[in-house]
Image (tube, helix red, strand yellow):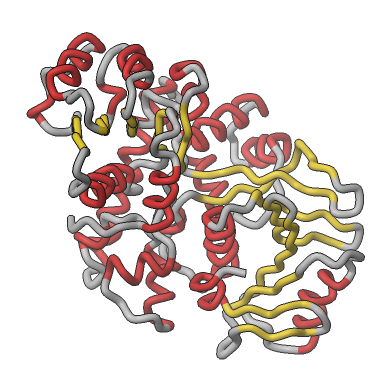
Amino acid sequence: MKIITRKQYADKVDSWIGKSQIIVLTGQRRVGKSFVLKDFIERHKNENDANFVYIDKEKRDFAFIKTDEQLGEYIDCHFVKGKHNYILVDEIQDIEGWERTIRSFRTEDKTDIIITGSNSKMLSSELSTLLSGRYEEIHILPLSYLEFLQFHSLDDNDDSLMKYLEYGGLPGLSVIGLDDEEHVWEYLRSIFNTVLLKDVIERYQIRNVTFMNNLLVFWADTIGKVNSATSISKYMKSQKQDVSTNVILDYTGYFEDAFLLKSVKRYDIHGKKIFETNQKVYFGDVGLRNFIVGSNRETDIEKVLENVIYQHLVRLGYQVYIGELRVGEIDFVCRKTNELKYIQVAYFLKDEETIKREFGRLQDIQDNYPKYVISLTPFVKNRDYNGVTHLGLREFLKNGL
């Protein structure tokens, strides 16, 4: 696959160079972590004092590196004193005890370390213990809409947007191509099966695979709805599956560890507090979500819109919550440093009643923070409606808020 610079992540990686922190690239399988690593080499290879020690554990050339001692010996052989040494290890989890060697080389002068690892053996939640807090985690997301256009050499138009909403943003699709729908779904099927097998079933030794699949379908089909482990347990019992709330919480946590989905907490807009129960769930890649439930978007387009907008808000650096008002729900409350923004998601604002419902709920919030409605309504780019900004989806995905 041709290496295309993903500027957002290139800038993040570069910003941590020279700060004595181990840079760890995390994210769902096949989301492009390895190519962010390779892109770093391409962008820095012409530096006069740069020396790269690059290990790709997916290549058989590096199969002999199995322990931290062998890792240390290899790095020592290729390390050049006096130069700026960049140590880059892809799929580092395949090296037993790797963290000992990595921690020791972090203390060398003019040395930066960038690693990637599989979710099946190196969880984000375990990094602090493994690396003694001396690391910066950069989470890689699927392609943004603009990246999707670039990777697939597409023009910005309605057809391209619909393909993005349908197939999602896994970078490998640029090799498969989008012309043959059967090939697209087969590719997504292979990624989905690998994630489930390696990052969920094998890691957590899942035995009740039928329930696991049913729970994942449930989450995929209920995007945009507030659920609790208790309500899901009751639903499963109605489907002849008697499963405890603890098992539901555990399995949902496993899906989150694999970056398949993310639970989003509720935020009390009046009380300015975060609720710990009854959350919504959104998927890491909307293409995989669509594969799970089937490819008919006509009946669940609003769910897909919510998912895509949620992911892009995260990509823009916001902490995202579900807003709770006495008069109803706000789709998203977005926080970043001193910023606070409110967002409603709508499919089409086709009549006055729909406009009043979507805009009126935001107008019920008694503060001066920015408020937005994002929709697929044709020809809308950026329009003010009594203090609430109406943004078209394409405009939002291209230019943010």
Q: How many marks?
A: 0
Residue at image point 38% right, 58% down: 7
- The percent coordinates of residue 238 (x first, y second) are 65, 40
**Looking at the image, is 136 positioned above or below residue 181?**
above
Q: Hey, which quadrant is residue 153 in on the image? A: bottom left
Examine the rendered structure and indicate whether residue 312 appears above or below residue 392.
above
The answer to which quarter of the image holds residue 110 is top left
**Could you say where residue 123 lies in the image, as x and y percent from the top left?**
45, 27
- Report the residue that reaches farthest toward the left: 61
* Image location of residue 256, percent across then percent down: 52, 37
257 relative to 142 in the view: left or right: right
Q: 343 above or below 323? A: below
Residue visible at 76% across and 68% down in the picture: 370
- Residue 346 placed where, x, y %? 66, 73
Q: Is residue 132 left or right of residue 164?
A: right
Q: Is residue 63 visible?
A: yes
Residue situated in front as seen by the camera: 216 or 281: 281
